[in-house]
Amino acid sequence: EAKRQEKIDEYADSMMNPYVAAQRGYLDDVILPQETRQRLISSFDSLRGKRESAMPKKHGNIPL
């Protein structure tokens, strides 16, 4: 049981952190908790004026 717990702890230390995910490209950035509010505000500000363009329809619906 001690060996099992040791392996669990080793895995948690080496794999269960945001830096591993960032290193593998799953995340864009790792930020500190105190930076979260400011990052969200600036991200939403940059998206405020963005307008999504509608994709043109390639095919209409035909009556069946």
Image (cartoon, rainbow, N blue to C red):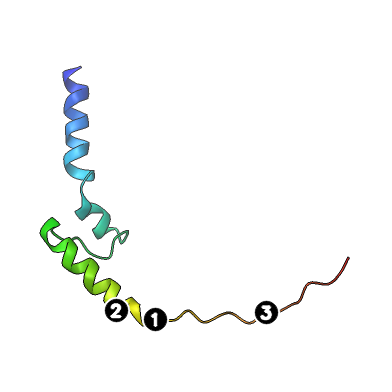
Q: Which residue is mark 3?
A: 57
Q: Residues within 10 Å of mark 2 (few under 14, many from 20)?
A: few
Q: Amino acid at mark 1?
A: Lys
Looking at the image, the residue that sits furthest to the left is 34
Looking at the image, the residue that sits furthest to the right is 64
Q: Amino acid at mark 3?
A: Lys
| Residue sitting nearer the eye, 27 or 36 | 36
Q: Which image quarter: residue 28?
A: bottom left
**Is residue 22 depicted above or below 8 in this figure?**
below
Secondary structure at badge 2 equals: helix
Q: Which residue is mark 1?
A: 50
CB under 8 Å between discs 1 and 2: yes
Please tell me the numbered disc located at residue 23. none
Q: Residue at x 29, y 61 (%)?
A: 27
Would residue 63 be found to the left or right of residue 40 on screen? right
Q: Which image quarter: residue 61?
A: bottom right
Secondary structure at badge 3 equals: loop
Q: CA distance from mark 1 to mark 2?
A: 8 Å
Position in image of residue 7 (x %, y %) = 20, 30
Position in image of residue 40 (x %, y %) = 24, 66
Would residue 47 be found to the left or right of residue 40 on screen? right
Q: Which residue is mark 2?
A: 46
